[in-house]
Image: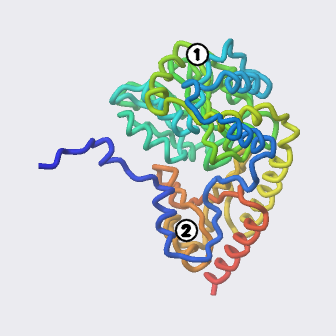
Amino acid sequence: MTQPLNPLVTELEPDRILTFQKSLSNYSDLVYLTFGEPGFASPKAVKEATKKAIDDDRSHYGNSQGELALRQAALAYLKDRYQLNYPSIDNLIMTAGVTEGIQAIFKTLLSAGDGLLIPDPAYGSYFAALSLAGGIALPINTAKADFKLTPALVDEVIASATVPVRAILFNYPNNPTGVSYSLAELQALADCFERHDLWVISDEIYAELTYEGHHQSMGKLLPERSIVVNGLSKSHAMTGYRLGLIAGPLALIEEIQKVHGSSVFSLPTFVQDGAVAAFKMDRDELAYMIDGYRERRDFAKKELEELGFEVVSPKGAFYLYAKLPDKVNLDAQDFALDLAKNGGVAIIPGTAFSLFDEAKRYVRLSYAADMATLKAGLARLKKYLAKQKD
């Protein structure tokens, strides 16, 4: 007799983005505007530090929580960029990307059946990680408030919850909408989170990709109840390095480290040495990336709006969340599939990020790719839509 498998796994819905990407595998010559893969190479200083580490035989086990030099560099980076004044490197854990960090946090904060608030639309991987931790998703429909989380929306969902509400996962600048928040808006939310006695998991991986004003961290507003998640994938074009971080109150970090240490033990030491170089870079050294993404954002948003899309105004990240033109009679899933098949462009339907019906009329385009790819994709989209008129 075959022994049963864990139902948390067998009943887990496959990642919707990856599933959609797989459905495009039969189509050739696609221009991909799907993944948030930076259209820049990793900085030279990072590559040189990584290569030197390999030449120096930095190929053995490292400190499970993160090499001392790396945590020192990350601690200084968080203080310089976001005025986060953690007292010690012991307040940080270096993780295998944000995804592993999120899983470790969920498994620490939540017991089976506990509720987690998730502003929707949201990155789909959150829901899978939550299911594996035995938690219950309590999505908040931000489409009702121009895709911004508000205290009223939080109050509404908590009032109707039938499970204990332990925490909120708050991602800004947001994937997929690009929405971010002013200091006044964040303070109002912080007051709301405190009133409801919530842990705040603040995913700020796109913090450096803020195009208007400066990113304000929830870790500064609510230091005793916030777990800040960040990393180098997006800000430094280092997605393949898989280098993330968690920062928060020491007592909580010590508990999360138990999960991280048993899951990953430690990150590759040569990757950590490369990350030290990244954290020590001045903001001005990375300005070319920010300027490049801002240019692509402005170009792509204008092109989409001229084609009849209604685009959520993005303040950060590198995505456009756009409502289909009224003349399009297909829902987002069918539109994205037909666009790939007959238009040669790959985008992601909004239903990959949302549990609410509004998403059936939205798609996400990434403008992370280089300008030539972006222009080619939008030219194909324009041609495809013109054909639909005929």
Which SS class for mark 2? helix
> Which of marks 1 and 2 precedes in the sequence?
1
210 versus 18 height, above or below: above
Q: Is residue 131 left or right of residue 65?
A: left
Way the structure is coloured: rainbow
Which SS class for mark 1? loop
Q: CA distance from mark 2 to mark 1?
A: 43 Å
Of 110 and 277, which appears nearest the observer? 277
Residue at horizontal 69 percent and vertical 20 percent from the top: 220
337 versus 116 height, above or below: below
Of 58 and 65, which appears nearest the observer? 58
Badge 2 amino acid: Ala
Numbered mark located on residue 360 in the image:
none
Of 346 and 143, which appears nearest the observer? 346
Q: Percent from the top left, x then y, of residue 293?
A: 78, 52
Of 1 and 197, which appears nearest the observer? 1
236 versus 376 height, above or below: above
Badge 1 amino acid: Pro
Numbered mark located on residue 336 in the image:
2
How many residues crowd mark 2 within 10 Å: few (<14), some (14–19), many (20+)?
Answer: many
Q: Is residue 213 left or right of residue 219?
A: right
Residue at horizontal 63 percent and vertical 66 percent from the top: 32
Residue 187, visible in the rendered structure: yes
Which residue is label 1 attached to? Answer: 249
Q: How many marks?
A: 2
Q: Percent from the top left, x then y, of residue 302?
A: 78, 62
